[in-house]
Amino acid sequence: MNNSNSRMNGHLPAGLTAYKRTPVFTEKTVPKGLLKDHNTKAGVWGQIHVESGQLKYIIPSKGKSHLLTPGIVGTVMPDERHHIEPVGPVQFFVEFWR
């Protein structure tokens, strides 16, 4: 797993504004759609915030997998197919920016 990738530092392009946030999900309440490949809409960035536990953020097209933990934010680029996998007990939410 690669946590050194610049997209894991939570930085977004300048000029974006947060407009939506999911509820906090757990390994038991995570929507099934997040567990299979999906993407954000054109022009929409996402940030995956882990409050407790660990979560894998996987980008199959790039062959990359990142382990997210509290303090390590996963940045999702617009239109990029990805999915997540809980690693044991976890609490997380997703914030959307445009």
Image (spheres, rainbow, N blue to C red):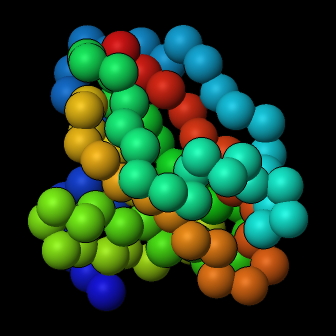
Q: Quadrant of residue 43?
A: top left
Q: Residue at x 79, y 36 (%)?
A: 23
Can see residue 52?
yes
Outermost residue, left side: 62
Identify the residue at image location x=64%, y=73%: 86
From the image, which quarter does the N terminus lie in?
A: bottom left
Residue 51: percent from the left, percent from the top?
71, 60
Residue drawn at x 79%, y 46% is 24
Residue 74's place in the image compared with 56, above or below, is above
Total residue callouts: 0
Picture coordinates of residue 91, whole percent (x, y): 77, 62
Compared to 17, does 48 lie above or below? Answer: below
16 vs 59, nearest the viewer:
59
Does residue 9 appear in the picture of this structure?
A: no
| Quarter holding residue 94 | top right
In the displayed structure, does residue 29 sit left or right of residue 50?
right
x and y percentages locating residue 6 in the rendered image: 19, 59
Horizontally, is 47 left or right of 92 in the view? left
Could you tell me residue 19's position as x and y percent? 54, 13
Question: Which residue is at 28% across, 62% downward?
Answer: 59
**Quadrant where the image shows the C terminus:** top left
Q: Is residue 76 left or right of residue 28?
A: left
Of residues 58 and 18, the one nearer the viewer is: 58
